[in-house]
Image: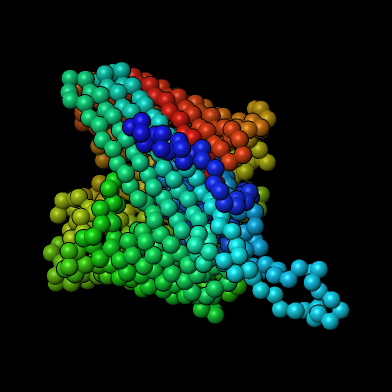
Amino acid sequence: MRAWMLLVLGLLLARPSFAQEHDVRVEVVVTAVSGGEVYLNRGSDEGLRVGDRVELLPDAGARLIGTIRSLSRASSRATFDGGVSGVPIGTRGEVLVPADRERDTAAIEWSHPPLEWNDETPLLAPVASRPPEERDMRVRGRSYLSYDTSDDRENDQRFTSARGGIDLEFENPFARGGRLAIDLDYFARDVELSGGSDDSDTRFRVDRLSYRHGVLRGRSSGYEVGRFLHGTFPELGVIDGFEYTRRLASGNVVGASAGFLPLPSDEMRTGDDLAASAFYRYVSGEEERLVLGAALQKTWHKGAADRDLLVGTVDFHPSSQSLVYATALVDYYTSGDDLKTSTLELTQLHAGANWRFYGGHGVGGFVSHLKWPDVDREEFSVPDATVRDGFVTRVGTNAWVATSKRTRVDARIAKWNDESDADGGDGSLRLTLRDVLYARGTVTLEAFANTGEFSDSSGFRVAASRRFTSGFLRVDWSSTELDQEDFIGGQRVLGRDSVRASYDWDVAPGWGFSAYVESITGDEQDARGLGFNLQRYW
């Protein structure tokens, strides 16, 4: 473990020999949460691009780091490393954008300085951008190193993990234009068990290694090759292969891809599942208030025909204060599929709508539907009966009211049911006080409850945070009671209390350090934890 930690520290400390630019922080706000993704209220008009890094700063909980996956002129969608469970609408964040991005987007770089002009030179002489061979290579992204340890005193167990890696993008790396993206991750884990054998393992994974050319500086077509997440349709997943896109004069986008689909596992094993896709993205008007997308994907598992998938997306902004969105995955089955009948079947649906009113109020609704596809690809480990008949449907609503400029109330309620007629739900009520009890800080009070088929839980959470000149302090306390239905014995009702304190520190320009300590107590629970995360932003 020491060797790779030294390697990552070297990457963190190294100084690049190529030109760098300072980043501009573009403030964003979460406008919707859907199926593991969040919608943000900023898009390409603010200089955002696919692949940009996003930071969300919830009023409660740790900072979330994610990536822009798709965007329009006025909005964008992003995914986050730890998921987005519990992130409320209205959560604020930042996107790091290169300071010169606007000039690059306009694709104007003067090649003739004014000193060369004279009375005979036309005032409106044509301009040209500098060719790639005359531009410097630039880099942006991050390198990171983290360490976490927890001591379970109740069961005499200890868990330790460490992680390091780089997530960098090089612009114009070969003096031919284009971008080279590298995302490497190394993970090590140690487990010490009382009365049992200890366990340790390591993992090295290439999350992305690709070269992208075109669709930059005003070009209408481009390609990406290597390992990467599909750009126009991230719903198609990560691919080891090739993607071509072309922007038409109307602004619509057409494209295709081909390659192998790595399994979404720790190793991301690849080579068994070949895929070919074609897609089309329709954009309505210069303001892009309506964006429709459709994609077809065909896969083969070890040479045999496997999945026929149709993906459809809708992003509709009737006004600047409203959003309607939907993503649907539909599978087509034939007589060659063992567990499904020959028909079209809705496999996944994530849809919703939000309306924001002037004064800081808003209301929204959402629905999701999930079934398991019948595929030979070794991605899902579920019983045949679940693949044949299983489903989970979830509907809910949320609302928020700004009772003043410094106070806000959020409410959320949802209900679910599945193929066994089991049902349940969850709800929460949150009060946020910003700069009320003290300056430059937030206090959040939240009550929550969950009902399920086998257990119910309820609890209360208090979080306080304060921003300092170079850092951000958070303290969270939660108390939860779990009631296990039909459980015989003294463990039917279990209590759990958790206290966590963290500090995010901007130690120097381009450097970030986060540390936390945590304590968990309750019925048959007694654990302590701590950890840190060191990042270098390029």
Observer able to see residue 523: no
Q: Is residue 391 left or right of residue 247?
A: left
Residue 432: % across, % down: 58, 36
Q: Is residue 433 left or right of residue 456?
A: right
User: How was the colour assigned to the protein in this rendering?
Assistant: rainbow
Residue 425: % across, % down: 36, 43
Residue 38: % across, % down: 47, 52
Residue at 86% in and 79% down: 119
Quadrant location, the N terminus: top left
Observer able to see residue 2: yes
Residue at 67% in and 40% down: 404
Residue at 49% in and 74% down: 221
Location of residue 151 with respect to 364 vertically, above or below: above
Nearest the viewer among 512 and 516 is 512
Nearest the viewer among 476 and 366 is 476
Nearest the viewer among 484 and 442 is 442
Location of residue 276 with respect to 126 vertically, above or below: above
Residue 173: % across, % down: 50, 59
Residue at 45% in and 64% down: 212
Q: How many marks?
A: 0
Nearest the viewer among 499 and 411 is 499
Location of residue 286 with respect to 54 vertically, above or below: below
Q: Is residue 410 left or right of residue 522?
A: right
